[in-house]
Amino acid sequence: MAVLLAYFSVVLIWATTPLTIQWSSDSLSFIAAVLLRMFVALALGLVINLVFRRKLFAETKVWQVYAAGAIGIFPNMPVVYWSAQFIPSGLVAVVFAMSPFVIGLMTLVLLKHNPFTVRRVIALLLALFGLVVIFHHQIQFSLKSAFGIAGILLSCFLFGFSSVLVKKLNVKVDAFNQAIGTLLFALPGLLLMWWYVDGHIPTSISMKSLAAVGYLSVFGSLLGATLFFYVLARMSPTAVSLITFMTPVLALILGALVADETLSVQLWLGAGLVVIALLLYLDLSAGNVFFKSLRKNIGAKILFWR
């Protein structure tokens, strides 16, 4: 039952991340917001490790995994924050749902394994068509929207490259240490970028920005990453990858309910095409794997209480 709780926690955290990213930039520049988020998360993680006397570099090769994982934070996260200024939060999640396709491409390049079949190529084309349906209106009337789309797509490539590179290194690391280690290796790059792009310490920060940064630091960067690696170690990658198409729909709904973002018919149609494409790409059997795991865990819980 703990695995399922962790699974749905990751879904909820990832669904709320795009909106809170936009909120964190309420009184901060995009690079200051991401730097403050990662700094707070790293500080909390290091304190926890210090209290429990956990070694961050217990193994000789763990630094390689930390460095590879850090790419998913820097330069990835500044790209996400910059792009989130130009498109609604729900659409950030929808575009990022292209990640499984990018990870498949990176698997082909880095691991020399071809994950693409005819079904998956068709799924990729369907997903691209869905994105065209979603963004056709925005691209036609706003050049900034095109920048936002391009930025999130670049983020997909950075995230995919980082994930597959960590897999290629094949070094076993504690999930919590991996989250802290990637933050530690990404921080210098974030500091340099902040100094070059911004370089100004804000004199006042709104409560909206502070609350968003606090949420993203604890739940998005520290707890979310740890739970993701925890779930990944206990469920099949196919079942875990279902998270990527569960979050966009939740993000769209949250954006509409909390931030008054518009949910047009075209947006729902395009989002539906992306979700169908992801189901086709991941194979419907992935859903069976997840629900079998669900029944197994619930059944074990019932037997325990009996």
Image (cartoon, helix red, strand yellow):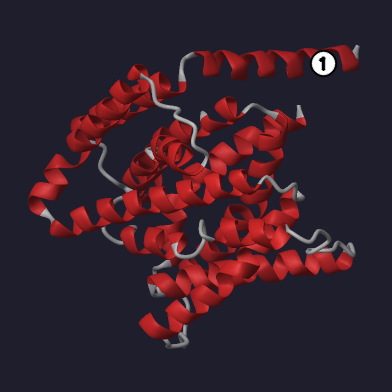
Judge left or right: residue 304 versus residue 240: right
Residue in view at x 58 percent, y 57 percent: 68
Rendering quarter of residue 183? bottom right
x and y percent of residue 85 in the render? 31, 62
Rendering quarter of residue 66? bottom right
Judge left or right: residue 42 versus residue 275: right
Rendering quarter of residue 167? top right
Residue in view at x 42 percent, y 87 percent: 199
Residue 284 higher or lower than 251, as above or below: above
Which amino acid lies under the numbered mark 1 shown in the image of this protein? Ala
Location of mark 1 (residue): 300
Residue 264 higher or lower than 275, as above or below: below
Asked if one can make out residue 215 in the rendered structure from this viewpoint, the answer is no
x and y percent of residue 252 in the render? 36, 39
Residue 81 higher or lower than 250, as above or below: below
- In this view, the residue farthest toward the front is 112
